Image: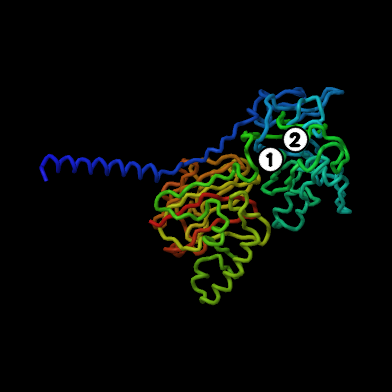
């Protein structure tokens, strides 16, 4: 070959290689954060963007960031409805609320104005109530005082919400709820709600539980609903969103919304967001139901079988028997919901583990807690833990820290370097790298653990296992995971 030709060909190969490397690099890049597209409806200071009973609602300087209904400010003869200036069609609404004892309010959906009763002239009213309060529930007789369609989350007068939260929670968690089978927390405690309104369908999630699933297209609204009332606004396509005051000091915060297109369908919208695995990573979960059984196994605490040394010392027959027990519990408490890996938080449920063991590895995982003061974590090589919790309402320490490290004795930092957590109900993204006993964690693109040794909580005198399973921890709270990718190093 002629020398000039050879040089030209060689140069072409080099350029081609650079382009290929660049393309591969772009293909392998993975976003460090999750952008869900929600916008705030409440700025935390005033009622900008709201209209209606603006004199009755506001912010107490002693509680910044909290929207409150002040019943003593209500103008006699005027409704206590505060509505958004903007109108909405399809949307997902997330918010936190706190009820006073026997408190009563409502969430108006697609209401035409602040002057009408949203329960009838709007698409509907979704009830907000202290369900277990003495005005609404007889605790001694264990009997409701209201109609089933009048409790929190109900499509008022039309579709009742779920009220079966009896004997399901762990002991100390059960005490959080107001009673009567309700999923509402006691007066003075914050609740997290996510409401999806798409076409004629409504889904209401309260503290992580789906309590209402309704389709109002089944009714004409001419008196054919369970309450036998006319609902002329039942099939409104658009309207305002509002809080419907009934003379009680109800509180809200972190109110945000995501608008959806008119073609949106329930079950195919946020929070589902399947991602493709980065180069070299194995997909453990990104939305397929079959991945739960294929890639994961249950964990049981029976006979301390959640500890690596106990499992490793057992016979093959013993391990098989205990795994069978663990998998049965897994199927009862872990499922795929809306394309997400969901843990119900009920008693009897426990952690989920990878079927494959890992030594050194990298991992991406999306997670969200759906209850105020919620708690979870990641076990690395079978050891606790990379902490997950509600950093904003409880400890005011960020998620991601190596919670069980004994910092005072060993100098291994246990707390996250900063709070990088999103609000309860919003998705977070972990990047975790483990080499030897050293762990690095990034949360939503922020470095929160910088090459810190993970200690062996189960036996502090022994080194951590060289190779073991990775676990999604349960801690008695509902939570969701998605987009979990792992690769060995």
Residue position for label 1: 195
368 or 277: nearer the eye?
277
Q: Which image quadrant for residue 86?
A: top right
Q: Which image quadrant for residue 244?
A: top right
Residue position for label 2: 107
Dot 1 alpha-carbon crowd within 10 angstroms: few under 14, some 14 to 19, many 20 or more: many
Q: In this rendering, is residue 131 above or below 240?
A: below
In the rendered image, the quadrant that contains the C terminus is bottom left
Where residue 64 sits: x, y (%)?
A: 65, 30
Where residue 462 sits: x, y (%)?
A: 45, 65
* Residue at x 66%, y 37% (from the top left corner): 93
Q: In this rendering, is residue 20 above or below 487?
A: above
Secondary structure of the residue carrying tag 1 is strand
Q: Disc count in the image?
A: 2
Where residue 440 sits: x, y (%)?
A: 43, 49
* Residue at x 70%, y 45% (from the top left corner): 206
> Dots 2 and 1: beta carbons under 8 Å?
yes
* Residue 120 badge: none
2 or 1: tag closer to the N-terminus: 2
Q: Which image quadrant for residue 262?
A: top right
Where residue 173 sits: x, y (%)?
A: 70, 53
Q: In this rendering, is residue 145 above or below 282?
A: above
Name the colour scheme: rainbow
Tell me the distance, in whole angstroms, between the alpha carbons under discs 2 and 1. 10 Å
Secondary structure of the residue carrying tag 2 is strand
* Residue at x 14%, y 41% (from the top left corner): 5
């Amino acid at each position: 070959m002629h020398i000039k030709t050879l040089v030209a060909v060689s140069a072409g190969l080099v350029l081609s290689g650079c382009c290929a490397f660049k393309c591969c690099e772009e293909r392998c890049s993975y976003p460090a954060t999750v952008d869900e597209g929600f916008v705030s409806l409440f700025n935390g200071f005033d009622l900008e963007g709201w209209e209606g009973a603006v004199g009755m609602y506001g912010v107490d300087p002693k509680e910044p960031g909290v929207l409150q209904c002040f019943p003593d400010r209500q103008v006699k003869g005027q409704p206590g409805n505060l509505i958004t200036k903007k109108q909405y069609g399809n949307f997902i609404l997330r918010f936190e609320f706190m009820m006073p004892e026997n408190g009563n309010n409502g969430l108006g959906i697609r209401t035409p104005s602040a002057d009408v009763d949203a329960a009838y002239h709007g698409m509907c009213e979704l009830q907000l109530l202290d369900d277990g309060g003495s005005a609404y529930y007889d605790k001694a007789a264990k009997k409701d005082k209201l109609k089933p369609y009048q409790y929190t989350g109900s499509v008022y007068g039309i579709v009742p919400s779920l009220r079966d939260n009896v004997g399901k929670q762990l002991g100390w968690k059960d005490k959080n709820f107001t009673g009567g089978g309700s999923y509402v927390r006691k007066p003075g405690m914050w609740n997290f709600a996510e409401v999806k309104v798409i076409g004629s369908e409504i889904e209401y999630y309260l503290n992580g539980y789906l309590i209402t699933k309704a389709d109002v297209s089944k009714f004409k609204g001419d008196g054919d609903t369970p309450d036998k009332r006319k609902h002329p606004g039942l099939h409104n396509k658009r309207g305002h969103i509002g809080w419907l005051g009934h003379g009680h000091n109800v509180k809200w915060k972190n109110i945000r919304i995501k608008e959806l297109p008119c073609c949106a369908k329930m079950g195919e919208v946020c929070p589902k967001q399947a991602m493709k695995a980065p180069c070299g990573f194995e997909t453990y979960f990104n939305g397929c139901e079959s991945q739960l059984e294929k890639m994961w196994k249950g964990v049981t605490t029976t006979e301390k079988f959640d500890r690596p040394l106990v499992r490793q010392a057992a016979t093959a027959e013993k391990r098989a028997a205990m795994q069978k027990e663990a998998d049965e519990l897994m199927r009862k408490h872990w499922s795929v919901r809306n394309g997400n890996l969901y843990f119900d938080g009920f008693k009897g449920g426990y952690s989920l583990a990878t079927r494959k063991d890992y030594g050194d590895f990298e991992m991406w995982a999306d997670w969200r807690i759906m209850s105020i003061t919620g708690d979870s974590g990641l076990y690395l090589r079978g050891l606790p833990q990379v902490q997950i919790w509600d950093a904003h309402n409880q400890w005011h320490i960020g998620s991601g820290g190596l919670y069980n490290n004994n910092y005072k004795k060993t100098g291994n930092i246990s707390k996250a370097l900063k709070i990088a957590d999103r609000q309860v109900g919003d998705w977070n993204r972990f990047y975790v790298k483990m080499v030897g006993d050293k762990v690095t964690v990034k949360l939503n693109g922020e470095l929160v653990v910088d090459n810190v040794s993970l200690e062996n909580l189960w036996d502090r005198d022994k080194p951590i296992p060289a190779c073991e399973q990775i676990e999604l921890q349960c801690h008695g709270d509902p939570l969701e995971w998605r987009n979990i990718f792992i690769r060995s190093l």
